[in-house]
């Protein structure tokens, strides 16, 4: 069974803290993604990675960085958390090739920055 | 620049009736479309998809229709059930392997018992 696991369901952090959100997938997928979900804005892509150590900016990368040292793990880093980064963060993975079109999502991390 | 648009933020439908959720896109390079369903505090789950070479795809109670000339797709749920109450997102991608999914803003569907 397909599984994408995010390390935390809920997090509360202080403004200015460095925050790490971890995501692990067990499907040997090449592609991994970080989205955030906000009311009225849908799911917006922050960063994605199509291979180990490879990354590309999504639509809203400002204030974030990522790390992909191993194929199964993709980390999102908030260098200095701010209140406007309070959101639901969703990790996803997808295989490569014509047969791999749907992305599988983790359960989400609700981050609150105070 | 919202390339995938869901213009109805919410929709209420009586149990047993048909639910129709709509989605419009602007990028003519999109050629694969997906619908996801999301419950609160959970990640989205894949529902159904359609390739641009088709105009209809059916899976049980769910049917997706694609009108390429209008750049419009819709999801039909028949009959609607209380468990269908969720937020529905449409998504689109270009069929080049590594391409990202671009999501719409979502429609909250409420099924009234």
Image (cartoon, coloured by chain):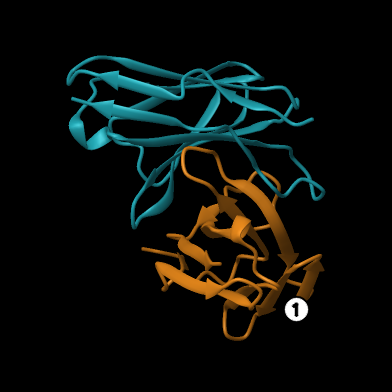
Chain colours: A cyan, B orange
Relative to A95, is A9 on the left or the right? left
- x then y, percent, for residue A22: 50, 19
> Badge 1, how many Cα within 10 Å: few under 14, some, many 20+?
few
For mark 1, what is the residue? B55
| Quadrant in which the C terminus of chain A appears | top left
Q: Residue at x 19, y 32 (%)?
A: A83
Q: Write down the chain letter for disc 1.
A: B
- Which quadrant of the structure image shows residue A54? top right
- x then y, percent, for residue A27: 75, 27
Is residue B24 visible in this depiction of the protein?
no
In this orientation, which residue lies closer to the viewer: A59 or B36? B36
- x then y, percent, for residue B6: 46, 69
Q: Identify the element where label 1 is drawn.
A: loop
Is residue B64 visible in this depiction of the protein?
yes
- x then y, percent, for residue B23: 53, 72
- Which quadrant of the structure image shows residue B62? bottom right
Numbered marks: total? 1
| Quadrant in which the N terminus of chain A appears | top right
Residue at the farthest bottom position: B69
Residue at the farthest front position: B113
The vertical placement of A73 against B25, above or below, is above
Q: Residue at x 36, y 37 (%)?
A: A61
In this orientation, which residue lies closer to the viewer: B12 or A81? B12
Q: Residue at x 75, y 31 (%)?
A: A2
The vertical placement of B8 against A114, above or below, is below
Q: Residue at x 55, y 32 (%)?
A: A107
The vertical placement of B20 against B96, above or below, is below
């Amino acid at each position: 069974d397909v599984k994408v696991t995010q390390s935390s369901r809920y997090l509360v952090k202080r403004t200015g803290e460095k925050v790490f959100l971890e995501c692990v997938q067990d499907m040997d997928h090449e592609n991994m993604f970080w989205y955030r979900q906000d009311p009225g804005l849908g799911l917006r892509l922050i960063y994605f990675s199509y291979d180990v150590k490879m990354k590309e900016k999504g639509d809203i990368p400002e204030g974030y960085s990522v790390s992909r040292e191993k194929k199964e793990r993709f980390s999102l880093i908030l260098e200095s958390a701010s209140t406007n980064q309070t959101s639901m963060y969703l990790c996803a993975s997808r295989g490569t090739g014509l047969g791999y079109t749907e992305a599988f999502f983790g359960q989400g991390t609700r981050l609150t920055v105070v | 620049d919202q390339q995938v648009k869901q213009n109805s933020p919410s929709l209420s439908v009586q149990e047993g009736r048909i639910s129709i959720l709509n989605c419009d896109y602007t990028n003519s390079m999109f050629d694969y479309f997906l619908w996801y369903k999301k419950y609160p505090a959970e990640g989205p789950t894949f529902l159904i998809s359609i390739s641009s070479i088709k105009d209809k795809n059916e899976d049980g109670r769910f049917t997706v229709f694609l009108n390429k000339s209008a750049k419009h797709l819709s999801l039909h749920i028949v009959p609607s059930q209380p468990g269908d109450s969720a937020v529905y997102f449409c998504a689109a991608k270009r069929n080049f392997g590594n391409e990202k999914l671009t999501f719409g803003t979502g429609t909250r569907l409420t099924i009234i018992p």
